[in-house]
Image: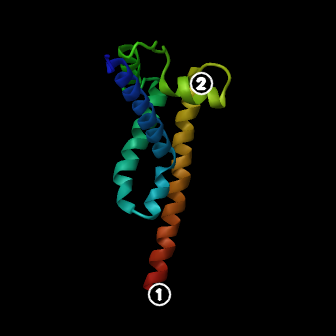
Amino acid sequence: MDHSPKLYQIFADLVVILHLAFVVFVLFGGLLVLWWRRVAWIHLPAVAWGAAIEFGGWICPLTPLETWLRMQGGEGGYNSDFIEHYILPLLYPAGLTREEQIALGAVVLAVNLAIYGWVWRRVLVTTSQSRS
């Protein structure tokens, strides 16, 4: 009994979980900076990457990897990107348009600017209180 197709399907599902975790980290990882400031060194490049993917209209390399794994496992792939295939059906009934993709990139930046602004204000208040 050959389990390799099932193994490919499992790996494809793991890629989806990793991809979703990355998207959540890009959007909300700035909150981790409140507890561990060094995470900003990982989070800010992730935000830049996520925004660049959306603004550039590119496909994240995890999407073709997942598609390849699914095809190796005997499943069909899909012709869209991760956000259009998994996330947008939750948010929008229609397919991803270029304008929506740019809006998603702007949301990534706006959310993170707001989070880092809040973190920065908290750091300043904490620093000024400790000096008093």
Front residue of 107 and 83: 83
Q: Residue at x 41, y 18 (%)?
A: 70
Q: Which residue is drawn at 43% across and 42% down?
A: 47
Residue lying farthest to the right in this orientation: 93
Quadrant showing the N terminus: top left
Dot 1 amino acid type: Ser
The number of numbered discs placed on residues in the rendered structure image is 2
In the displayed structure image, the side of residue 2 where residue 105 appears, left or right: right
Front residue of 86 and 94: 86
In the displayed structure image, the side of residue 68 where residue 91 appears, left or right: right
Mark number displayed over residue 3: none
Q: List the residue tagged with mark 1.
A: 132
Disc 2 crowd, CA 10 A, few/some/many (<14, 14-19, 20+): few
**Could you say which quadrant of the image residue 16 lies in?**
top left
Q: Which residue is drawn at 48% across and 37% down?
A: 20
Disc 1 crowd, CA 10 A, few/some/many (<14, 14-19, 20+): few
Figure colour scheme: rainbow
Q: List the residue tagged with mark 2.
A: 99
- Whole-angstrom CA distance, mark 1 to mark 2, is 49 Å
Q: Which of marks 1 and 2 is nearer the N terminus?
A: 2
Q: Residue at x 35, y 49 (%)?
A: 42
Dot 2 amino acid type: Glu
Residue lying farthest to the front in this orientation: 1
Looking at the image, residue 21 lies above or below residue 8 = below
| x and y percentages locating residue 10 in the rendered image | 40, 28
Which element type, helix, strand or loop, lies under badge 1?
A: loop
| x and y percentages locating residue 52 in the rendered image | 43, 33
